[in-house]
Image (spheres, helix red, strand yellow):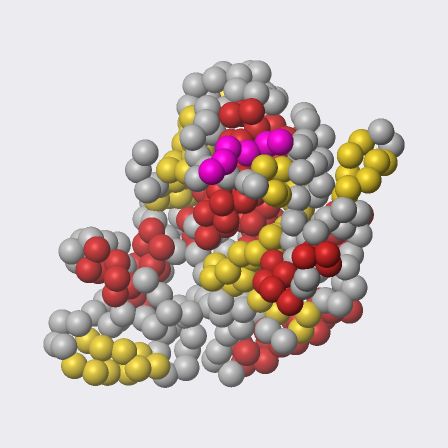
Amino acid sequence: MSSNSLGRNFVVTCFGESHGRCVGVVIDGCPPGLELSDVDVQRELDKRRPAASSIFTPRREEDRIEFFSGVFKGRTTGAPLCMLVWNREVDSRPYEKIRWMPRPGHADYPARIHYKGFNDYRGGGRFSGRLTAAYVMAGAVAKRLLEGLGIDVLAHVVQISHIEMVEVPSVEEIRTLVYSNPMRCADGDVARLMENVVQDARDAGDSVGGVVEGRVLNVPPGVGQPIFDSLDADLAKALFTIPAVKGVEFGAGFKAASLTGSQNNDAYTMKDGQVVTLTNNSGGVLGGLSTGMPITFRVVFKPTPSISKPQQTVDVRALVDTDIEVKGRHDACIVPRAVPVVESMAAITVVDHLLAAGFL
């Protein structure tokens, strides 16, 4: 399997570049007979588009989904699914001017070395967040498969810069409120504070990062493939493929370091005839297997590296120090737009493991 593919049973292969003709995905392993339409996929893609706010990039790709194979008369055929969206709002001129100057915080320099200078440098090429459109298309299919099992995947922004949610929102609040504001936060008051911080960063020619929390509900216990293909390991890998992700934690995460064993352990009890735990510090995974409790995780995103403030870099052709100001159309914070991407990568991974366990 190439590095452009993810999964063993539900295999997702993405293609395209930020400023190329299109961005697309091929899915091999989707079971036949799944009801699937362009509306199902478009609904998820629309969540990824920037909200109507001055804090987001003015690049407004239409992202109209097109199926090329794998669906016939509204159902999957079992053949590979191929979907794509076209890149129509492309302006590569700013990148020609800085072609020889690797942008700080981007993969420009290591990519140049790895691909011997033949990589597409426009907009980051394969390393751009634009590629997450392919993730979301695949995630839409995965979500449809999970719906049949009553499994729900949710995500929401819990922190932007120093603004952090204190109250833990209910599942219903996440479902109903997240997409009602541009920050994709389940608390409207906190969302307004977050938006102000992003606007301040944008006005200063800078950027900010944040944290997205994800939840996968109703996964049956025992799903996973230890040791090296464990459920949380594969989830972490999938989440780390999202550009700008710099950290992933499950359940109590790094806070577990300050707990005792008696505090961190999740005690078992019976509820409605089912074995459950009183707490969920494990994040719904033990030994690489699902416990039956909600799978909970947090994903840390670094600040958008494309900023207009002058930064130091080098001219790799002349081999001299120089300064760079990154022009173009960029988000001052990519975290809100990452919410459906986080959901998608979680859904893809869970579907892959459910297929291995015989649930699909």
Give the residue at x 51% y 25%: 356
| 233 shown above or below 312 | above
Q: Which corner quadrant holds the N terminus?
A: top left
Q: Is residue 3 visible?
A: yes
Residue at the left extreme of this rendering: 318
Residue at the right extreme of this rendering: 272
Residue 71 image offset from top left, x and y in percent: 50, 21
Foreground pick, 336 / 222: 222
- Quadrant of residue 318 within the rendered picture: bottom left
Residue 223 image offset from top left, x and y in percent: 59, 32
Judge from the rendering whether residue 9 lies leftward or rightward of residue 217; answer left or right: left
Magenta stretch, residue numbers: 222-227
Foreground pick, 122 / 223: 223
Q: Is residue 43 visible?
A: no
Give the residue at x 42% y 26%: 28
Judge from the rendering whether residue 86 lies leftward or rightward of residue 295; answer left or right: left
- Quadrant of residue 51 within the rendered picture: bottom right
Residue 4 image offset from top left, x and y in percent: 34, 41
Give the residue at x 47% y 38%: 227
Judge from the rendering whether residue 360 lies leftward or rightward of residue 188; answer left or right: left
Residue 261 image offset from top left, x and y in percent: 68, 57
The kind of secondary structure the magenta stretch mainly shows is: loop
Magenta-drawn stretch contains 2? no
Q: How many marks?
A: 0
Q: Which corner quadrant holds the C terminus?
A: top right
| 333 shown above or below 299 | below
